[in-house]
Image (cartoon, grey):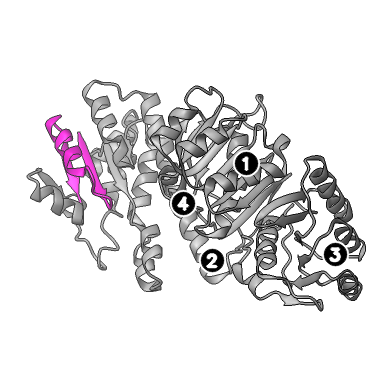
């Protein structure tokens, strides 16, 4: 039996080769892999002894040869193929272990296009595909994670058709993902990210118990390794709906740098937010906005959960808490609650991957776009349109309201007072309804909106929303501007003594 080993990621390859050698396998290898195995004392045949042709063109051609691909592809059960292989002097290759040139690492490290081109693997994917096509006769190994598994299967005769088929599927996934990565990179570099085809590729992290509903299947997939590095399930199992709500809470809580931000989300929309001197006080203030909706909600803590904070949060039922981290005593506080789920990112503060692109499924396809970015300078550089200027605290409240509004389902209006959200109306067909609904909700929970700052993620088409805000006691408003009736909105703000700022940037979220 012969194995061909040619890997870019050389972790574990020596041990794998020695394992094969001990089982009586003959090893063929190329370039750097050949050198590493030889230095480790493994008996290896260099590739050009098989191909009868030297590596050439600076290593661009070494395995593209009929002695290699014939050895991989001929059907062992076909008398015709066996006869032809014998006539051509082609010996079988029964295991291929290949992982590909580090294209992703290269594009993350350099913008030198000539170097990037040289890190596009040609021979590797060809060998992988050949082996996968002939999986009934050839074991194809594409990840170091499978080395022990494969050695065990060979030694204990467990390399069944089903086992080989699983390796085959992994192999085609491996080459497909590799080609997707290259195609997407080239389109980003030369076509602004919007080529004739758009590919979305993610690696499975774990299966959820079900999807949005029990009759649906679901799973979490990641770009790069964001979740495997930054998502630890300390207590409980993340559901499909938990993950979408966690995403919403994270986006809001991480929008304010290292500040003590606490965000509470229910069904994808914020129902509480605050930034105070401590995380404990931030949580208490955030909860005041809508304690009824917070019941069974998701809380994002931009920091480390202490025992004191855990005791406070444990007073009501929360579905999920995600935090930078948890002190062991805090985890113990939650230990007796069966339904709560705790997720940590293993850091002092919360982290976001900050994907460059965003997409949504629609029937028959998907729409794809650059990710929206709510930048800090949008508020700092906002244009004062009224006669009255906001105070320092009002400007802080405007920043908070603006960022939350941009991350809340349209149409939405957000009210913030003393760095805490006091009212929010979201997902409404009318912006006036959103403003009124938010105020009504605030009154129901006993919150005073007087002196608050208000934000709308899109312009106010009429002055009626300003009049409603004035009746509620709003002192500062921030919105994109751009309506044909902006002058009426500005006039209304001046009539009511409200400071008004235009950002010139809209943030619809549908």
* Residue identified by numbered label 3: 460
Residue in the image at 79% along x and 77% along y: 385
Cα separation, mark 4 vs mark 3, equals 36 Å
Q: Examine the structure image and report whether residue 497 is included in the region drawn in magenta.
A: no
Give whichever of discs 4 and 2 has the lower sequence position. Answer: 2
- Is the C-beta separation of discs 2 and 1 under 8 Å? no
Give the secondary structure at mark 3: loop
Q: Which region of the structure is painted magenta?
A: 1-29
Cα separation, mark 4 vs mark 1, equals 18 Å
- Is the C-beta separation of discs 2 and 3 under 8 Å? no
Relative image position of residue 357 (x, y in whole percent): 59, 58
Give whichever of discs 4 and 3 has the lower sequence position. Answer: 4
Give whichever of discs 4 and 1 has the lower sequence position. Answer: 1
Image height check: is 352 above or below 391?
above
- Is the C-beta separation of discs 4 and 3 under 8 Å? no
* Residue identified by numbered label 1: 245
Relative image position of residue 378 (x, y in whole percent): 65, 70
Is residue 367 something one can see in this rendering? no
Give the secondary structure at mark 2: helix
Cα separation, mark 2 vs mark 1, equals 30 Å
Q: Which mark is residue 22?
A: none
Image height check: is 503 above or below 344?
below
Q: Depth check: give the residue in front, 476 or 405.
A: 476
Disc 2 vs disc 3: which is toward the camera?
A: 3
Dividing the picture into quarters, in which one does residue 482 lie? bottom right
Residue in the image at 66% along x and 24% along y: 215
Relative image position of residue 103 (x, y in whole percent): 38, 59
Specify the farthest residue to the left: 41
* Residue identified by numbered label 2: 188
* Residue identified by numbered label 4: 349
Dividing the picture into quarters, in which one does residue 22 lie? top left
- Is the C-beta separation of discs 1 and 3 under 8 Å? no
């Amino acid at each position: 039996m012969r194995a061909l080993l040619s890997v870019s990621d050389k972790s574990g390859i020596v041990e794998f080769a020695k394992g094969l050698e001990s089982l009586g396998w003959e090893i063929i290898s190329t370039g750097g892999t050949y050198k590493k195995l030889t230095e480790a004392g493994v008996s290896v045949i260099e590739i050009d002894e098989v191909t009868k042709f030297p590596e050439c063109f600076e290593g661009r051609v070494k395995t593209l040869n009929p002695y290699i691909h014939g050895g991989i592809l001929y059907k062992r059960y076909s008398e015709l193929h066996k006869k032809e292989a014998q006539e051509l002097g082609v010996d079988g290759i029964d295991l291929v272990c290949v992982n590909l040139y580090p294209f992703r690492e290269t594009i993350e490290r350099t913008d030198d296009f000539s170097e990037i081109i040289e890190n596009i693997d040609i021979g590797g994917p060809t060998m992988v595909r050949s082996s996968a096509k002939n999986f009934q006769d050839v074991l194809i190994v594409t990840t170091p994670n499978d080395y022990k598994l494969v050695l065990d299967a060979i030694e204990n005769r467990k390399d069944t058709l089903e086992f080989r088929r699983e390796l085959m599927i992994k192999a085609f996934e491996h080459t497909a993902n590799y080609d997707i990565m290259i195609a997407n990179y080239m389109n980003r570099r030369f076509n602004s990210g919007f080529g004739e085809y758009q590919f979305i590729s993610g690696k499975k992290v774990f299966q959820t118990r079900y999807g949005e509903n029990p009759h649906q299947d679901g799973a979490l997939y990641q770009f790069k390794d964001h979740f495997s590095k930054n998502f630890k399930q300390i207590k409980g199992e993340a559901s499909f709906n938990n993950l979408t709500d966690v995403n919403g809470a994270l986006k809001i809580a991480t929008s304010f740098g290292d500040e003590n931000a606490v965000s509470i989300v229910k069904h994808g929309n914020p129902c509480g937010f605050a930034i105070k001197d401590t995380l404990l006080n931030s949580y208490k203030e955030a909860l005041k906005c809508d304690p009824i909706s917070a019941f069974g909600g998701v809380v994002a803590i931009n920091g480390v959960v202490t025992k004191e904070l855990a005791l406070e949060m444990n007073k009501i039922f929360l579905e999920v808490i995600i935090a930078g981290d948890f002190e062991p005593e805090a985890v113990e506080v939650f230990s007796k609650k069966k339904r709560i789920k705790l997720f940590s990112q293993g850091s002092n503060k919360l982290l976001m991957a900050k994907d460059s692109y965003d997409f949504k499924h629609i029937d028959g396809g998907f729409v794809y776009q650059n990710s929206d970015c709510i930048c800090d300078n949008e508020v700092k550089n906002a244009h004062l349109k009224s006669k009255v200027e906001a105070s320092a605290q009002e400007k802080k409240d405007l920043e908070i309201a603006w960022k939350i509004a941009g991350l809340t389902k349209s149409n939405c209006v957000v009210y913030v007072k003393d760095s805490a959200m006091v009212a929010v109306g979201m997902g409404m067909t009318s912006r006036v309804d959103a403003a009124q609904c938010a105020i009504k909700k605030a009154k129901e929970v006993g919150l005073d909106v007087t002196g608050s700052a208000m934000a709308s993620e899109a312009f106010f088409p009429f002055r009626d929303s300003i009049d409603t805000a004035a009746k509620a006691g709003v002192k500062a408003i921030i919105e994109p501007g751009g309506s044909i009736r902006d002058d009426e909105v500005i006039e209304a703000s001046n009539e009511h003594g409200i400071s008004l700022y235009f950002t010139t940037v809209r943030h619809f979220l549908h």
